[in-house]
Amino acid sequence: MIWLARTIMNKNIELIKNDEAGRLAIETIENVRTIQLLTRTTLFYSRYESASKHQKRSELTKGIFEGINFTISQSFTYIMMCLTYAVGIHIIYTQQKTSDNVFRSIIAMLLGSVAVMNSSAYFPEFVKARTAAGLLFSMIYRKPKTGDADKGEKVVRRGWIPPIFSLTGRVVVRLQTIRGNILFDDVKFSYPQRPRQPVMRGLQFSAQRGQTVALVGPSGSGKSTIISMLERFYDATDGSVVGEKGTQLSGGQKQRIAIARALVRDPKILLLDEATSALDSESERAVQEALDLAREGRTCITIAHRLSSIQNADLIVYVENGKVRESGTHSQLMHRKGRYYQLIKKQDLAT
């Protein structure tokens, strides 16, 4: 029964870790609008059906072991009764013990076997609770690779003078009062979900106390990741100092992917809502050129606050309070010097 308990528990852990069908169902429900928009309902249904078949096989295997356990536990009393009577008769026949002692032993064995049989009814719940508790405590007692931030500790490489004690080639030191100095020393980092795609490739810079350091660069270059590492949301893969839903992608990358997904389907009507709002200047120009080509032969409705992206539109409609206030081409509206002209002036985009 102990072997069965361990087997069932391992199956439960495997089902929890490999619940692809459940994760896919949650992802589909959370993004149902996008899936319907891209007419991918059938594809996700097929993927869910395939994942469910694997889940079904695992559940059947677990059910077989649970059935074996139930059979053994329910027949345990009768097996013990047969064995106890057989051994008791043999003991009385060979005159090793008196019948009174054998009878008391039989009663004790029967009561014990009944207790085992009754407690086995809660065995499946015990296995589930133990599995869940094991996963929970494994998270609670997980140790960060770079030290305990709450205790103000830091893990450094061996070779540094160990003021406290060592841990497998590393040293844990107690940090003093935070002074505000920041040093990124040859930091290498990749997201746990994508370990083979490095985000940081030997990042090296320092910020002295009181300095203001600006991080600039194209979309997806790792600027936001640097902040996340400073906030201890992630630990460095190597060096000193440091998902579902595109958490590993920057806003610009997600926006480019959304545009590509729309264009690859070759739609007759193209709807663009702030299509380039999260892009840097270089990426915006490249995407804007691609969108200008993609508009040819298609009906396109564009929403934009960055007015430089819609100056080549065939018709510009100025909407205010749910009503059309002005309409025309860019040059026509600029000549009228109305609301659109004032908006252009505010953005300093007049040509």
Image (cartoon, rainbow, N blue to C red):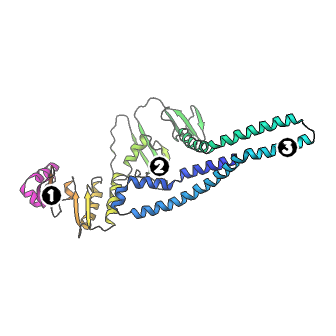
Amino acid type of disc 2? Lys
For label 3, count other residues whose C-alpha is less than 10 Å away and answer few (under 14), some (14-19) or many (20+). some
Residue at image mark 3? 87
The front one of 100 and 200 is 100
Amino acid type of disc 1? Val
- Separation of disc 2 and disc 1 at Cα? 49 Å
Counting from the top left corner in percent of width and height, residue 258 is at 33, 59
Counting from the top left corner in percent of width and height, residue 303 is at 22, 56
* Left or right of residue 83: residue 319: left
Counting from the top left corner in percent of width and height, residue 253 is at 35, 55
User: Which of the labelled discs sits on residue 308, or is there none?
Assistant: none
Residue at image mark 2? 188
For marks 3 and 2, the one nearer the N-term is 3
SS category of the residue bearing label 2:
strand
**Name of the residue lying farthest toward the top:** 177
| Residue at horizontal 81 percent and vertical 43 percent from the top | 84
The front one of 184 and 13 is 13
The front one of 163 and 224 is 224
Q: Given contact means CB atoms under 8 Å apart, are the residues at marks 3 and 1 in contact?
A: no
Counting from the top left corner in percent of width and height, residue 114 is at 71, 40
Q: Which residues are magenta?
A: 323-350
- Separation of disc 3 and disc 1 at Cα? 97 Å
Amino acid type of disc 3? Val
Q: Given contact means CB atoms under 8 Å apart, are the residues at marks 2 and 1 in contact?
A: no
The front one of 167 and 101 is 101
Tell me if residue 336 is in the magenta stretch.
yes
For label 1, count other residues whose C-alpha is less than 10 Å away and answer few (under 14), some (14-19) or many (20+). some
| Residue at horizontal 37 percent and vertical 56 percent from the top | 32
SS category of the residue bearing label 3:
helix
Quarter location, residue 111: top right
* Left or right of residue 262: residue 162: right
User: Which of the labelled discs sits on residue 317, or is there none?
Assistant: 1
